[in-house]
Amino acid sequence: MNNADKTRGGWSWWYLLFVIQFVVILWPPLYNKIAPTFMGIPFFYWFQMLWVIVSAVFTAVVYLATAD
């Protein structure tokens, strides 16, 4: 048979990074404020933009850590 069937599947602790990014973004009271501003942009907006980048990094880390 194929060795890919044996190595694929299963659960890894690396997947908890996905849970972290979803919990942070789906909990608006954490970042629902105006101050501090960054270059005139309220915290509410630049925090979400920052998490777009952080989420991309988390996804790359999980992909590289779980790839065979």
Image: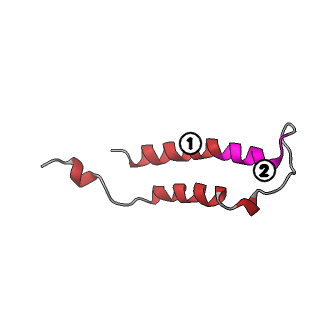
Image coordinates for residue 35, horizontal then vertical, percent: 87, 51
Which span is picked out in magenta? Answer: 41-51
The span from disc 1 to disc 2 (Cα, nearest Å) is: 19 Å
Discs 1/2, front: 2
Magenta stretch: dominant SS? Answer: helix
Q: How many marks?
A: 2
Q: Nearer the viewer, residue 64 or 49?
A: 49
Q: Residue at x 54, y 47 (%)?
A: 58
16 falls in the magenta region: no
Residue that numbered label 1 is attached to: 56
Q: Would residue 24 appear left or right of 66 to someone viewing this image?
A: right
Going by the picture, which residue comes out furthest to the top? 39
Q: Is residue 12 left or right of residue 51?
A: left
Q: Which mark is residue 44?
A: 2
Figure colour scheme: secondary structure
Quadrant in the picture for residue 25:
bottom right
Relative to 9, say whether 37 is above or below: above
Q: Position of residue 67 (x, y in %)?
A: 37, 45
Of 47 and 26, which appears nearest the observer?
A: 26
Q: Residue at x 51, y 46 (%)?
A: 59
